[in-house]
Image (spheres, rainbow, N blue to C red):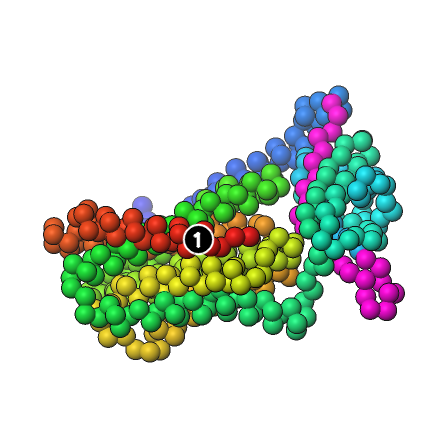
Amino acid sequence: MTADPHPESRDTSHHETKSLLRWVFIFLPLVLLGILIVILQAYGPGKALRTHFPPVEKIAFQRIVLRDQDLTAERPKEIILHILNDGPSETTVAQVMVDEAYWPFEIRPKATLNHLESAQIHLLYPWVEGDAHEVTLITSTGVTFSEEIAVAVESPTPNWTYLGIFSLLGVYVGVIPVFIGLLWFPAMKNVSARGLSFLLSLTVGLLAFLAVDALHEALEIAAELPEAYKGVALVVAGFAGCLLLLMVISRWARTQAAQRGEAFQQMTLAYMVAFGIGLHNLGEGLAIGSAYALGNIALGGTLVIGFAIHNTTEGFAIVAPVAKQRVALANFIWMGALAGVPTILGVWIGGFTYSAVWSVLFLGIGAGAIVQVIYVILRQMERQPEDAGVLIPSNVVGLLVGFFIMYATGVLVTF
């Protein structure tokens, strides 16, 4: 017998063949599944059944924009409806009624919409500022879909005036209150270990209210989303995704703390609190901006005062983890900006291009961030001596007081 003169070449060829077969078996089921879906769509029994039943039609109103008459009266008042075909069947908008009267309209890009296709309906209608109006769409099969304009006000358009107004609103209700709350830091410097434990428990109560509030608001908005968007699943995705991501970051922080000391971990925790509050305030800003655009918000002194009191406690929650250490002024500025500035961005987005989908996602993300921070704080408190742990009476009282403070100040904020 003679030896194989090229054993290495044969091994390489065998390895490449096995690798190729592995990729083939990875993609083969996906290809077959795609073929099956095409066959079912084109020739499956569902196609035959659909011909014996009426189509399932459902139109969702995504946004209603009101345009006022311009100064030269060359452009009349206008209502613009942003709609989405939320049903599985092809749907055609045949007629439009405003306040129980048929009204001429223009629909762009087309009147017949497939599943998840969207369109804009333009109506030159003399709406009355401050009054309520009702818009009804009638499909080619006679099905009707109605939406009420609770308070008719002109929708904001992106310009320097509205940009300045929304920026000031975000500063007043988000940025300034958070920085005011940071001023509690010097008062915390001389607290005892028991007192610091109480403050951390108070912080957990504050954050717990924010998490519950964000989830509640996210689920409320999710219920109004088109069914095809699966609003509740979107909330869960944002919540779980952010929670898991921050858990990875927290694990990295613990590793770094072993090398840089406990002070680094405390500072990281303070930044995580600021980040979670910032995401919550982004969702809060979205709600403020969208409510303003729809005319459903009272922009009076009571609202600003209510938000100022409510959000000031958020600054307290940020500095509590670092109450016993020296903190540079730059860190206070960065943490305050991280928590407060997203409010401005949220007001911009909500006022100019409100999207319920983004509101739901960001509120879910904010809730997930806050829950992860609560977990980190509680885990830190568990490592303390038994006379300063989570379940001692004073800390339980602190948690309840924190929750009640946020509830009481939240009552002052009314839309």
In the image, what residue occupies the spot 87% across and 47% down?
104
Query: In this picture, which residue range is highlighted in magenta?
Result: 53-77
Location of residue 47 in the rendering, given as x and y in whole percent from the top left corner: 71, 27
**Badge 1 is on which residue?**
410
Q: Is residue 308 above or below residue 13?
A: below
Q: Is 370 placed left or right of 264 in the picture?
A: right
User: How many numbered discs?
Assistant: 1
In the image, what residue occupies the spot 35% across and 54% down?
405
* Magenta stretch, overall SS: loop
Q: Is residue 52 visible?
A: yes
Q: Is 199 placed left or right of 111 in the picture?
A: left
Viewer-side residue, 400 vs 265: 400
Q: Residue furthest bottom?
A: 329
Q: Is 52 placed left or right of 307 in the picture?
A: right
Q: Is residue 135 above or below residue 347?
A: above
Viewer-side residue, 158 vs 42: 158
Which quarter of the figure has residue 78?
A: bottom right
Viewer-side residue, 4 vs 15: 15
Q: Is residue 266 above or below residue 91?
A: below
Location of residue 110 in the rendering, given as x and y in whole percent from the top left corner: 80, 47
The 10 Å Cα crowd at callout 1, few under 14, some 14 to 19, many 20 or more, is some
